[in-house]
Amino acid sequence: MSAIGSLLAAGRYVIFNAGRECGEERWEILATPEGYLVTGEQEVVPPHPFPNRQEYRGTLGPDWRPAKLEILWRVGERRLRATHRTEGGMWRVRIEYGGQVRDQEGDFPDLCEVEYGTHLFNTVMLARRDFQIGGEHEFPVLRIGPPLMAVSPERMLYRCVERGSVETPFGAVAAKRYVVSLPPGPEEQGYSFWADEDGLVLESYEGPDRSRPWMRLVELRRGDAAPGFASR
């Protein structure tokens, strides 16, 4: 039990680039009186072409809708802090870097999602939608990432393409496979992943198939709040 909330799940991903392991991400999801809290640290090292370290903290409402995301990003000696928050139907951003401050804002309609470079935000998206095999959802998305951890508005398409069993270090897990793309771009420019019944990503790939691994869940711990995790 955390002083902030009850543990739903915590784990560790290994990260790959061009088929070679190059980093890891440690994360946790808490249930809080206000909703949910996702936190983590991610670091990639050579042979990744862009070594960096990220720390993040995201707050969600009881319906899993993102409300705030704080990011501390380090590349070598350079340090950037980005603070994202909702306010009156708007998504507002403040970026602090090199002694300068930049602000950004835009609409954040009810159907809009947020994508950031951790698979916990895939879990958040799945928590807000029901998928059957062959089902798909298209929606607006705010994509957050380098070089400034600012927002790029896009359209995103999720397709649930198959059901299967994924072998993990903690046993075989029943899962569904999803393919993610940015219309009108082709699926080959997107990514895919297997997620368990709670929407936790077990494995992901750079593209629609398994030829280029991206992340793999190698450690998982479920907390006392986990029994209700799947019933969202």
Image (cartoon, helix red, strand yellow):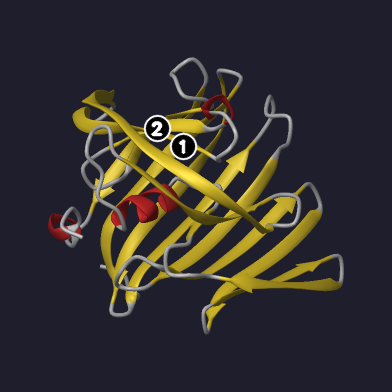
Image quarter hosting the C terminus? bottom left
Q: Position of residue 217 (x, y in %)?
A: 37, 35
Instruction: Kindly indicate the quadrant of the structure image that contains residue 223.
Output: bottom left
In the displayed structure, 91 sits above or below 20; it is below
Q: Is residue 121 visible?
A: yes
Residue furthest to the right: 99
Which label sits on residue 193? 2
In the displayed structure, 117 sits above or below 226; it is above
Name the residue carrying label 1.
180
Other-residue count near label 1 (Cα within 10 Å), few / some / many at <14 / 14–19 / ≥20: many
Q: Residue at x 32, y 64 (%)?
A: 30
Choose between 190 and 195: the one closer to the eye. Answer: 190
Q: Residue at x 87, y 71 (%)?
A: 99
Q: Residue at x 49, y 70 (%)?
A: 109
Marks 1 and 2 close (CB-CB < 8 Å): yes
Q: Secondary structure at mark 1?
A: strand
Q: Is residue 3 visible?
A: no
Other-residue count near label 2 (Cα within 10 Å), few / some / many at <14 / 14–19 / ≥20: many
Image quarter hosting the N terminus? bottom left
Which numbered mark, 1 or 2, is in the foreground of this view? 1
Residue furthest to the top: 211
Q: Secondary structure at mark 2?
A: strand
Q: Residue at x 42, y 63 (%)?
A: 111
In the displayed structure, 212 sits above or below 198; it is above
Precedes in sequence: disc 1 or disc 2: 1
Choose between 159 and 26: the one closer to the eye. Answer: 159
Marks 1/2: CA distance? 8 Å
Instruction: Kindly indicate the quadrant of the structure image that contains residue 83.
Output: bottom right
